[in-house]
Image (spheres, rainbow, N blue to C red):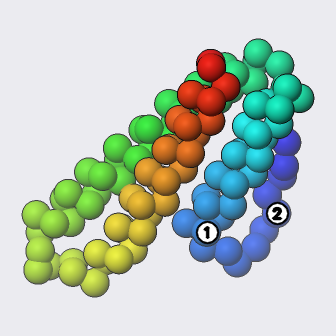
Amino acid sequence: MFDLVECSVETDEAQHWISIIQEAEIEDYLKGNKSMEDAEALKAQIKKLNAQATALKMDLHDLSEDLPTGWEKIMEVATKAYNAYESLDAAKKRQTASGA
């Protein structure tokens, strides 16, 4: 797997690139280059992404309840939630396409 080195990349951007790398690994599986162990890894990844997306959904919900306090965080929290659900959706589509 890939080792992350120290850099000045924002956490959200790093998570986005990690998702892209994971999606590439899923593509390899779909092309027949991976084993059934990777199908289990995909299921585990979906479970993890689902938990992250749910937590971010709750963060967005909590932020909305506190408005107008914290309004300046709306774009940050919404972007994190959007990216999480985008990654989750892509992983689920790949799982469906693989028949796993």
Amino acid at pointer 1: Glu
The spot of residue 91 in percent (x, y) is 58, 39
Amino acid at pointer 2: Val
Residue drawn 30% across the image and 52% down it: 57
Q: Name the element at disc 2.
A: loop
Instruction: Give the residue at mark 2.
Output: 5
Q: Nearer the viewer, residue 82 or 28?
A: 28
The spot of residue 53 in percent (x, y) is 41, 47
Instruction: Give the residue at mark 1.
Output: 13
Q: Quadrant of residue 27?
A: top right
Q: Name the element at disc 1.
A: helix
Numbered marks: total: 2
Image quarter hosting the C terminus: top right
The spot of residue 12 in percent (x, y) is 55, 66
**Vertical placement of 3 versus 88: above or below?**
below
**Vertical placement of 14 versus 31: above or below?**
below
Q: Nearer the viewer, residue 22 or 2?
A: 22
**Vertical placement of 26 versus 15: above or below?**
above
The spot of residue 68 in percent (x, y) is 11, 80
What is the residue that sits farthest to the bottom in this orientation?
72
What is the residue that sits farthest to the right in this orientation?
33
